[in-house]
């Protein structure tokens, strides 16, 4: 008998709301043949994410969403999709070690972690984010968890270019010290990979659906990074 498809849980990025991911949710449900749930971190929780307390609030909501998905599936593990900062939070959620007095042990509930435009490798950023990369570098919990790290190649930063290119240059430089490179408009390609993961670069893919841009959640793009059961 073929085992049932693993449910999917999506954790959005900084200041995101579940509404942003409705199209992605529908595309994933069709591809996975399983329920897809979006964790509702809420903008208030993300505003607090500059501190460990804020991260803990998002982790608790992610835990509740994953636990519901596992319970409704009658057991098993989920595929966790983390967009932007959500991918970094997902890496921390996997850990069996305590974070602010609570061990989430997500590696026991997650079979695959897919990160989309996540700022994994940075020279600046919140202390918690740097702590994640220092404590759980790369695909730290592989092969228990399969890792896929996706980056978009959409805009090259240029300090003297168009408004979009200047903005990308500023953001890329803030994250990794070099603004004159390719990325998804917010996160440079240099920041998106994880050592030991299946790393993907997708051409023409933006970080977010601003102005109707083709982004990680566009149905044709979802098909490029999601393949059921593939690490």
Image (cartoon, rainbow, N blue to C red):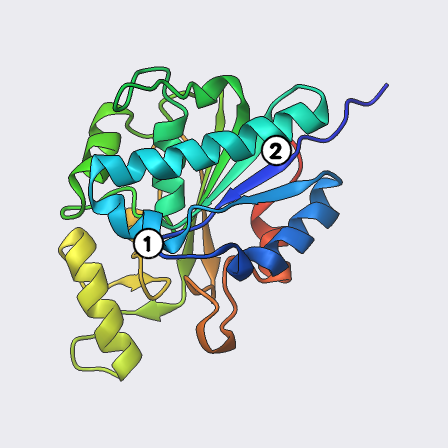
Q: Give the percent coordinates (x, y) of residue 15.
A: 36, 57
Q: Is residue 45 above or below residue 206?
A: above
Q: Which quarter of the rendering shows the C terminus? A: top right
In terms of depth relative to the viewer, which is nearer, 155 or 174?
174
Q: Is residue 212 above or below residue 66?
A: below
Front-most of residues 199 and 63? 63
Disc assigned to residue 1? none
Q: Nearer the viewer, residue 169 or 48?
A: 48
Give the percent coordinates (x, y) of residue 74.
Answer: 71, 21
Asked whether the viewer can see residue 231, the reply is no
Q: Determine which quarter of the picture holds residue 2.
A: top right
Label drawn at residue 230? 2
Quarter-of-image position of residue 127? top left
- In the image, is residue 158 above or below residue 47? below
**Of pointers 1 and 2, the one earlier in the residue sequence:** 1
Could you tell me which residue is drawn at 29 percent across and 57 percent down? 188
Most extreme residue toward the right is 1
Disc 1 target residue: 189
Question: Which residue appears at 45% of the width and 36% of the height?
Answer: 61
Taking the spot 41% from the left edge, 51% from the top edge, the residue there is: 42
Please say if the residues under marks 1 and 2 sit with CB atoms less than 8 Å apart: no
User: In what element is the residue under mark 1?
Assistant: helix
Which quadrant is home to the N terminus?
top right
Residue 12 placed where, x, y %?
45, 50
Question: Along the horizontal axis of the image, is 215 left or right of 141?
Answer: right
Q: Does the rendering let one see residue 110?
A: yes
| Residue 169 appears left or right of 70 | left
């Amino acid at each position: 008998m073929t085992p049932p498809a693993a449910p999917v849980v999506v954790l959005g990025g900084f200041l995101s709301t579940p509404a942003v991911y409705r199209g992605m949710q529908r595309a994933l449900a069709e591809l996975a043949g399983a329920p897809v749930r979006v964790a509702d971190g809420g903008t208030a929780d993300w505003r607090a994410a500059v501190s460990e307390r804020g991260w803990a609030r998002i982790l608790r909501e992610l835990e509740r969403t994953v636990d519901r998905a596992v319970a409704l599936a009658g057991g098993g593990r989920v595929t966790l999709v983390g967009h932007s900062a959500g991918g970094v939070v997902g890496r921390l959620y996997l850990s069996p070690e305590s974070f602010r007095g609570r061990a989430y042990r997500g590696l026991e509930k997650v079979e695959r972690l897919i990160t989309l435009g996540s700022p994994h490798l940075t020279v600046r950023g919140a202390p918690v984010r740097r702590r994640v990369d220092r404590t759980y570098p790369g695909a730290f919990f592989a092969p228990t968890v399969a890792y896929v790290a996706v980056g978009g190649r959409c805009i090259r930063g240029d300090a003297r270019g168009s408004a979009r290119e200047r903005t990308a240059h500023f953001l890329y430089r803030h994250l990794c010290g070099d603004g004159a490179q390719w990325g998804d408009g917010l996160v440079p390609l240099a920041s998106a990979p994880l050592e030991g993961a299946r790393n993907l670069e997708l051409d023409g893919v933006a970080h977010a659906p601003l102005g109707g841009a083709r982004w990680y959640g566009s149905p044709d793009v979802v098909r490029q990074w999601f393949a059921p059961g593939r690490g």
